[in-house]
Amino acid sequence: MIDFHFETDFKLEDVSKYSDWAARIITTNKRKHSQIDYIFCDDNYLLDLNQKYLNHNTYTDIITFDYTEQKVIGGDVFISVDRLKENASKFKVDFKDELLRVMSHGILHLMGYKDKSEEDSLLMRQKETECINMFHVEQ
C-alpha cells in the first residue's frame, strides 16, 4: 500500500494518480512493494529528522527511511514542501515536475539506486526523468 500523510498545509490532488504512478515505477522495475508512506512536511520538520537520525544540520528536500526486504520495497519518504518550492524556482522547473522528481527519487533509493558519486547521480537523474515521463504519459 502507498499512503500519503500531510504535516503541512500542502495536499496532493487525486492521490490515487500518485499512488498508481508510484506502484507502476516499482512494478516496471520488476519489484513488489509493501508499505510505502510519503510524508509531506516543512523545512523545520525535516531538519529535525535530519539532525536526530542522520546527524546532519542541513535542510534537505527528502529523507528516505528504507524498510525494503529483498525485492519487496517498503519505507517512509519524508519530503519538504518548502524545499520543493525553492528548488522549482531555483532550477526554473514546474512545481509538479519537481514534486514528481523528488517522489521518484525516494522510490529509486528504496530500489537501491544511489546518488553519492557523480556516476550514480547521473544514473539517478536519468531514472528520475524516466519516472516523470511515465507519470505524464498516463495523464
Image (cartoon, rainbow, N blue to C red):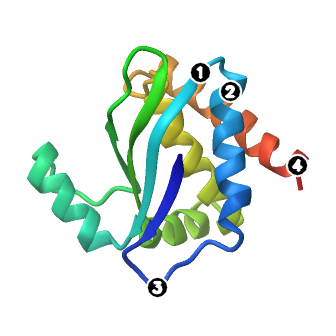
Q: Earlier in the sequence, mark 3 or mark 2?
A: 3
Task: Judge whether 64 appears above or below 46 on screen.
Answer: above
**Foreground: 68 or 61?**
68
Q: Position of residue 62 (x, y in %)?
A: 39, 52
**CA gap, disc 4 to disc 3?**
27 Å
Report helix, strand or loop for mark 2: helix
Residue position for label 4: 138
- The amino acid type of the residue labelled 4 equals Glu
**CA gap, disc 1 to disc 2?**
5 Å
- Which residue corresponds to the image point at 64% horizontal and 43% vertical from the top-left? 22
Residue position for label 3: 9
Q: Earlier in the sequence, mark 2 or mark 4?
A: 2
- The amino acid type of the residue labelled 1 equals Arg
Report helix, strand or loop for mark 4: loop
**Foreground: 44 or 26?**
26
Mark 4 nearby-residue class (10 Å; few <14, some 14–19, many ≥20) = few
- The amino acid type of the residue labelled 2 equals Thr
Report helix, strand or loop for mark 1: loop
Q: Earlier in the sequence, mark 4 or mark 3?
A: 3
**CA gap, disc 3 to disc 2?**
31 Å
Q: Earlier in the sequence, mark 3 or mark 1?
A: 3
Mark 3 nearby-residue class (10 Å; few <14, some 14–19, many ≥20) = few
Q: Which mark is residue 27?
A: 2
Q: Which mark is residue 31?
A: 1
Horizontally, residue 72 falls left or right of residue 76, namely right
- Which residue corresponds to the image point at 61% horizontal and 48% vertical from the top-left? 101
